């Protein structure tokens, strides 16, 4: 779906959008030809439709398909659609697509290469299971596989297993960049038919991975089956002749981050996500309310790494209970990172509200937070900056922040990071700076504050985060959580906080998904029907 | 799903939630028995699970099912699950449920009654198609069928057709009340085996519909099939003996609203929705910012009809450009309806923001709107009122309001009403008051203002609303809209407004769905990937 981006959600059900995708793909083929690249066979993922299928129940209108096409000499030579349609987590493909029923095989230099899309690689029994019988010497899969911590190793193991099953080399090509809440990490690679890793592209960076691999000479097409296990084998020949002998390239094997570098990987995912979100939504600069705490400090640091210090605007907004130390730490952060800074006291506005509306002090904390939200939005309106919400996943899960206050913004970089993860990422970022001989971007005081404060009535952040992760990330029930060793009273309190915060979570801006289960699209709950 | 409410979305994937539903249903059976009602056979819809099904791809974890059970003498005597799982609009049942494969038949007084759930009635080829062969004399369907304008007549026609197809009487039982964005209108009815309407319950009101109907004597069970078309017929006998002769009741046929009373029906749906949303979320009172315009006037009126004038708080919040006439009209509304009123000028706060943040006047309109949002939230924090957002569907579609200003609130009663519909509903409400000899609740000036103002750069509201309805409600593309006769420049402008407002729409509070396609759950678009 690289032509349209992924996912397009209900746009897949719009005829005009499907037509535009098909048109763009034909246009790409013609452009390649016009620019002298038509002789290169190019495989591209796009949104297409199954023609000639009438409307019927259980089938999305217009019969859209998640498809791939072979572009060659200005034309679409071969088209095939995804068969396995995932319908869980962030995926709703059973809602959007009609499944395919073909295995596409391209003959290039006398070798047969089969193609498949994403989930068809993961699930048994689809077109991938027919590759061996179809006689292909290599399988290349196109993936828009969202980033998740530590998922990459699963992918490699899967491809190694599939290579041995089908007796063919496997090329795994994955999208890079980000869209809305999804991050795509690249990390494309090739394994040979024994499952041996041959070449690997970098993680999170775009790359052109060029390598040489020995493939078996394809059989005569007449000797190959036209259908295997209910899947039609659709073929196109680009060239029958093997290339002349030449000196093979040395394979590229981008060194992997070591397993202990989970923090580096997550941090890069967050930077990638913010960079693409800003770019794709037309923002050149961002604005962050800087409090002296760890959440806003890390958010600003990610923004600097994504967009450059000159495009980051930090606003310090002291209120009635803000300490001089907090202001100093916030200003320290702005100075260290060289971002644009300004200070706006929220006290005059809070005073004005209280006088004009005759308010008591019941909602003072919420009011201050909302005034800060207004200041950010007003400055953003003037300067065209994307406002970043700084809340972390723990705050979002427990409803800690103020609706229309802390939740104000167009993007929330830490939305899927537990409070303890934020601390670890900030620590890693400072260490990384030190390794390069630089000053730590995040003031030490911001760390202390994160550990000390911010947890009214809740114990050790590590305990709370692991409880939250068990409840939200793995759907453990209350009885199970107590059996897991969490204190019963804490379980009750935390579960109640989480369930009651559903409304405000829904109003929260999008943010990068980095865990198996975040609090955005892949966890959909009704607002009523709490079951505390 | 009356035990859990509908829809429960991802809660269906939580084992603990499914277990709680099953436990509650068993508890209900025991309670009926304990209270001396155990002899009555009761059919209830609930969330259950298919036991003994291992985890596998394409099947939701825990194998939840949308089920019904026969409760009799303290036990669940018969359980069956929905077969057709709708996967469009507000429905995502393919994500949540494992389909059933049975037709349940209960023998009562020697007559056989089959049961089915909602979509199984609408689609061909499911368990309903086996009713005739299974020998049942009546089919009763359980429905949580969301309200849509003018849908009721389709339901009656469908049941009449099904009755003739299966040669059996059909009882259509529908939920009443509301949950989140869905409204359920009741309007339950019974047709005989010729499709003749026998009895009908009121629309939007709870009712116990008791009627007599002649049913054929059931055949010997041994002579009836155990399976039809792949569906197992599961049977339970409550009683074999027909009742002794008695004088039949006169059927109840609640008079239908006439076809011209579309406005009365929609208005009642909005009132029902707000009443249940407030109740189910624990709010006794609501708060509305009252501007003198038609949107806030109608919102306040709906609130009064839903919760009583004493539970409605109107806040007049004049700003720099507010006219004396607007203030007067807002105060007039508060007086007419007898709601709690207060006035809070937003000028001191706007001044404070401008001075403290050094703002120019670029975002003044947004700033004023956001200050109003803050005032409402602050007063709501003090008084525990549910804040109502007053925007209409036209404003929401075109991004007319200010994010965190007009969009502040827990519920948006007019979210699915076009601007022209709002005007018509308000007019109807005034007429209805006049018919009962009362004063019109909505000041005449508010109507004039709706027609004159609020449409910067856009033409006749009727044209814009019908263009929006074609674009959003029926997925017409730009070329098609121009072919439909809309002016090309207008199409381009309006489509661009709609596509760019996706982000702020997502942050908007829920509101009652009354059209086939609203701007909430049943229209899911990515924020990026606009295709203006």
Image: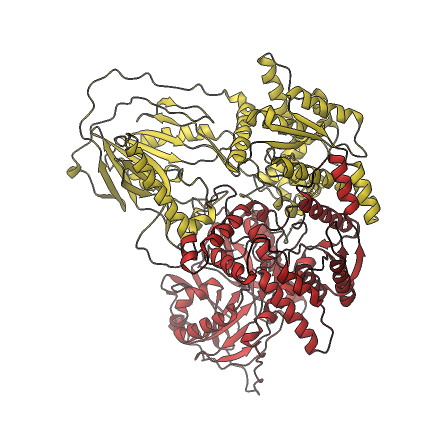
Chain colours: A red, B yellow
Q: Where is residue B178 in the image (x, y as percent from the top left)?
A: 49, 34
Splitting the image into 4 quarters, where does residue B407 fall? top right
Task: List x then y, in percent, for residue B364.
Answer: 79, 41
Q: Is B268 positioned to the left or the right of B465 in the image?
A: left
The furthest residue to the top: B437
Number of numbered discs overlaid on the protein picture = 0
Could you say which is closer to the camera, residue A456 or residue B141? A456
Residue A280: image x %, image y %? 67, 57
Residue A209 occupies quadrant: bottom right
Note whether B316 is above or below A524 in the view shown.
above
Judged left or right of residue B312, residue A198 is left
Quarter that holds the N terminus of chain A: bottom right
Looking at the image, residue B432 lies above or below residue A57: above
Residue at left offset 68%, top offset 24%: B334
Q: Can residue A377 be seen in this view?
A: yes
Residue drawn where x is 83% and y is 43% of the image: B361
Is residue B365 something that shows in the picture?
no
Residue toward you, B320 or A105: B320
| Residue A279 vs residue A373, the one in the foreground | A373
Residue found 44% across the figure and 59% down from its top = A84
Task: Say if A58 sits above or below B133 in the image.
Answer: below
Left or right: residue B239 compared with residue A243: left
Q: In which quarter of the image is residue B394?
A: top right
Task: Please tell me which residue is depicted at 25% across the width and 35% down the height of the picture.
Answer: B73
Between A375 and B5, the residue placed more toward the observer is A375
């Amino acid at each position: 779906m690289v032509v349209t981006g992924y996912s397009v959600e209900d746009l897949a059900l719009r005829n005009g959008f499907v037509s535009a995708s098909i048109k763009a793909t034909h246009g790409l083929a013609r452009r390649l030809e016009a620019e002298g690249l038509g002789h290169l066979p190019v495989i591209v993922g796009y949104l297409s439709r199954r023609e000639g299928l009438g409307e019927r129940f259980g089938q999305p209108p217009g019969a859209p398909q998640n498809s791939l096409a072979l572009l060659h000499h200005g034309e679409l030579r071969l088209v095939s659609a995804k068969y396995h349609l995932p319908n869980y987590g962030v995926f709703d493909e059973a809602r959007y697509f009609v499944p395919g029923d073909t295995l596409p095989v391209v003959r290039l230099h006398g070798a047969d290469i089969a193609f498949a899309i994403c989930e068809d690689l993961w699930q048994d029994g689809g077109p991938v299971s027919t590759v061996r019988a179809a006689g292909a010497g290599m399988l290349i899969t196109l993936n828009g596989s969202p980033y998740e911590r530590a998922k990459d190793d699963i992918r490699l193991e899967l491809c190694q297993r599939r290579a041995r099953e089908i007796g063919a080399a496997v090329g795994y090509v994955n999208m890079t960049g980000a869209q809305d809440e999804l991050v795509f990490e690249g990390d494309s690679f090739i394994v040979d038919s024994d499952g041996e890793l041959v070449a690997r592209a970098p993680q999170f960076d775009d790359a052109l991975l060029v390598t040489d691999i020995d493939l078996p000479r394809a059989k005569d097409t007449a000797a190959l089956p036209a259908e295997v296990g209910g899947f039609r084998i659709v073929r196109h020949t680009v060239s029958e002749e093997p290339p002349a002998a030449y000196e093979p390239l040395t394979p590229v094997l981008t060194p992997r981050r070591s397993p202990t570098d989970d923090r580096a990987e997550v941090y890069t995912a967050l930077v990638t996500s913010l960079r693409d979100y800003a770019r794709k939504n037309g923002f050149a600069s961002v604005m962050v309310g800087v409090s002296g705490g760890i959440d806003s400090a890390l958010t600003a640091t990610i923004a600097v790494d994504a967009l450059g210090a000159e495009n980051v605007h930090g606003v310090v907004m002291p209120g009635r209970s803000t300490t001089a130390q907090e202001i100093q730490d916030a200003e320290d952060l702005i100075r260290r990172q060289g971002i644009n800074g300004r200070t706006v006291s929220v006290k005059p506005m809070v005073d004005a509200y209280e006088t004009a509306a005759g308010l008591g002090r019941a909602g003072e904390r919420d009011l201050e937070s909302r005034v800060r939200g207004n200041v950010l939005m007003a400055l953003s309106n003037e300067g065209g900056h994307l406002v970043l919400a700084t809340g972390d996943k723990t705050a979002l899960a427990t409803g800690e922040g103020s609706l229309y206050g802390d939740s104000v913004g167009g993007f929330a970089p830490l939305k899927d990071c537990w409070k303890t993860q934020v601390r670890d990422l900030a620590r890693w970022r400072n260490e990384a700076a030190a390794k390069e001989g630089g000053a730590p971007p995040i003031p030490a005081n911001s760390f202390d504050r994160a550990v000390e404060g911010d947890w009214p009535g809740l114990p050790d952040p590590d305990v709370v985060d692991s409880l939250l992760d068990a409840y939200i990330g793995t759907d453990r029930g209350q009885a199970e959580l107590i059996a897991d060793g969490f204190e019963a009273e804490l379980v009750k309190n935390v579960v109640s906080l989480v369930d009651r915060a559903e409304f405000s979570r829904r109003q929260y801006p999008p943010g990068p998904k980095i865990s198996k289960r975040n609090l955005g699209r892949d966890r959909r709950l009704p607002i009523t029907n709490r079951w505390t």
